[in-house]
Image (tube, rainbow, N blue to C red):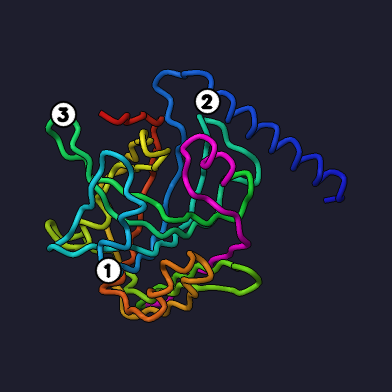
Amino acid sequence: MCLRYRKYLHTMCLDRIYSLIYKLKYSYIANMSFLTAEWRKLAIANYAIDSAVLTPYIPLGTELDLWDNTCYVSLIGFLFKNTKLMGVSVPFHSNFEEVNLRFYVKYLDQGVWKRGVVFIKEIVPKVALSLVANTVYNENYVAMPMKHNWTETENEREVEYKWRCKKQWQSFHVTAEKELSAIEPGSKTEFITEHYWGYARYNEFKTNEYEVKHPKWNHYHVKKYNIDVDFELTYGDKFKFLNHLQPASVMLAEGSEISVERKKIIHAQ
């Protein structure tokens, strides 16, 4: 493909994305999800930490959601597949990696607790992807070079996600059983994988809320893992301590088709 044609296609993609952003910000399309996709092969490393570290990041109206009186942050790598924004597939932006650092919150809505997540940072390989999420949802996306590798043998599977932060490659590698297993009800794995809401701090007076819809997931039992990540480099000085902390657990979920619904705003009372 000639360079001039590639530049033309790139410009067309950006024009389509800008058009979608405009529609999302200034119009309402009934019964249409903001995003539909598949999330596949979610490698998840969970770190038990002091909850005070997360206090500055807790959005208005939410509070930390603990498992067995323990506060967790999770490093998660996975693959987006067949991604569509408002029903539209954007060329070169359908299949891509994401790596994020997140923690767990809950929000009491008319007497019902909603369990959700807050993202410290989300890494994707395309600038346009980060532009959409940051503009519409006030999330914390950044763009970095990324790649992944999935392999299978007769008895096991390997999943690896890599991203280049300031010229240094970071990696998260998991080796797991090949066969899927059901997630045990009431387990830590269920707690980590079944938070169906996203919350993003807009300012001290407002929080963005959005629903993430997906069925209950299955997982692969992890045999071993390797996390070669400079957390200070990737996530800043406040998370430097993770460089010296072993994860309390590591998981590999298969994932599923998902949809991210349109945002709502929670206002200060």
Q: Which is nearer the eye, 83 or 163? A: 163
Q: Which is nearer the eye, 256 or 133? A: 133
Left or right: where does residue 102 sit relative to residue 139? left
Measured as percent of width and height from the top left, residue 97 is found at 52, 57
For badge 2, the amino acid type reads: Lys
Residue drawn where x is 36% and y is 34% of the image: 205
For badge 1, the amino acid type reads: Ile
For badge 3, the amino acid type reads: Gln
Earlier in the chain: of badge 2 and badge 3, it is: 2
Residue drawn where x is 61% and y is 74% of the image: 168
Q: Which is nearer the eye, 39 or 75? A: 75
Q: Are marks 3 and 1 in contact (CB under 8 Å)?
A: no
* Residue annotated with mark 1: 49
* Residue annotated with mark 2: 25
Residue drawn where x is 17% and y is 60% of the image: 67
Identify the disc placed on residue 110: 3
SS class, disc 1: strand
Rounded to the nearest angstrom, the CA distance separating label 3 from label 1 is 30 Å
Q: Quadrant of residue 145?
A: bottom right
Earlier in the chain: of badge 3 and badge 1, it is: 1
Q: Which corner quadrant holds the C terminus? A: top left
Residue drawn where x is 58% and y is 30% of the image: 21
Measured as percent of width and height from the top left, residue 31 is found at 39, 22
Measured as percent of width and height from the top left, residue 39 is found at 42, 51
Residue 207 shows in the view? yes
